Amino acid sequence: MDAPLRLAIVGGGGRGKSFLIPMDALRDKVTPVAVFDPSEIVLEWWKEHRPDVRRFGRYEDLLEHSNADAVLITSPLIHHAPQAVQALNAGKHVLSEVVAGVTIEQCWELVEAVERTKLVYMLAENYCYMRSNMMVLNMVQQGVFGELTYAEGAYIHDCRALMLNSDGTLTWRGALRRMFKGNIYPTHSIGPVAQWFSINRPDGDRFVRTTTFVTKTAALPLYVKERFGAEHPGAKPEFWVNGDSVTTIIETEKGALIVLRVDANSARPHNMTHYVLQGTTAAYISARHGDEENLIWIKGRTPGYSWESLMNYADEYEHPKWRKLGELAKGTGHGGGDLLVLNDFADAVLQGTPPPIDVYDAVTWSSLVPLSIESVNRGNIPVDVPNFKRL
């Protein structure tokens, strides 16, 4: 296929609009040609700011009548899997925002659709492309960490202001917290870690069991009470199904443990990129906030038995993708991840290279959503993780 890749944006609101920045930086490789959104207000924005992009108020019309080669799905996450399957069945390649699906059935439908159509599907997990995460990945692949035994990933982001509209009605994010009790947003935490452990890769590892625990709901009803008053139904803890903080534990086939925390309710400054990695010859701890550094210890290299800055090893272990595109990626969103994920997807479609986050990665990571719900509903027992590659 000749460049540029013609891309349709599915969900033209804030997240969809934000991809115009990396698309502009990659204009010779990818270009927006269509947008779908059910909101007339959103479509009016596109008419005013990007009249060259064809607008659709029905998703089916976009799939049938646009000249897009691929779709970028940025709609609310409960729509991701159905819209991806529709696009694949219509002959469109798919780049999907996280998560890939919210049920095990949706995950299998995605796998089967990709295998049947032979089209490119990639999950747009931009946290995998952050500079420090890619540097650690490069170090793991070059043997710096030795044998991996333990990891942590956490996404701690006070999103309470995003749960309700200004009139007190629920946004889609708020509605999710009335629908599910479990880990409903795991991929920012698990994505980079899964790559470090070579999950789903030849001679790599595999998730085998997982269990999840959920705290009570306290911070969110307090926020609602303070903002909308005690009479708002959301000011009562029983209004919400999910708790404030969720912890998921994963056991791998090779005996490693991975601990995830996702918390979008608690009142505290953000710590959206918390990671820990332990190997037999190195250890890594990410920075907790902007005034700290990412820290590493490497056996036989770090002076003394203490921590040092990860960036001390940038010259030696900077990931090749960051060496090539790092300067271009800066300022394009999510620490450069938005540009790098879009670039890899375009290469997969245009050049036929394997997508770095393929459908098997997407559904393995996203399956933690329904598996966490099942674990909680069954008294926090461990549940088996499906082997979507059927190995």
Image: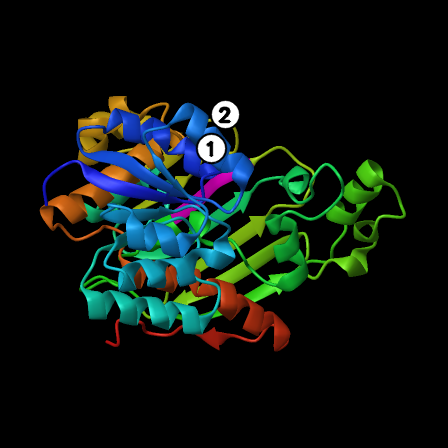
Q: Position of residue 214 (x, y in %)?
A: 64, 61
Q: Is residue 172 left or right of residue 10?
A: right
Whether residue 354 is visible: yes
- Real-space Cα separation, disc 2 to disc 1, in angstroms: 7 Å
Q: Position of residue 283 (x, y in %)?
A: 36, 44
Residue of label 1: 287
Q: Position of residue 291 (x, y in %)?
A: 51, 22
SS assignment at label 2? loop
Please tell me whether residue 272 belongs to the stretch shown in magenta. Answer: yes
Residue of label 2: 290
Q: Amino acid at mark 1?
A: Ala
Q: Residues within 10 Å of mark 2 (few under 14, many from 20)?
A: few
**Quarter of the figure with the N terminus:** top left
Q: Position of residue 30 (x, y in %)?
A: 22, 35
Tag shown at residue 256:
none
Pointer 2 with pointer 1, Cβ within 8 A: yes
Give the magenta part as a residue range: 271-277
Total numbered labels placed on residues in the image: 2
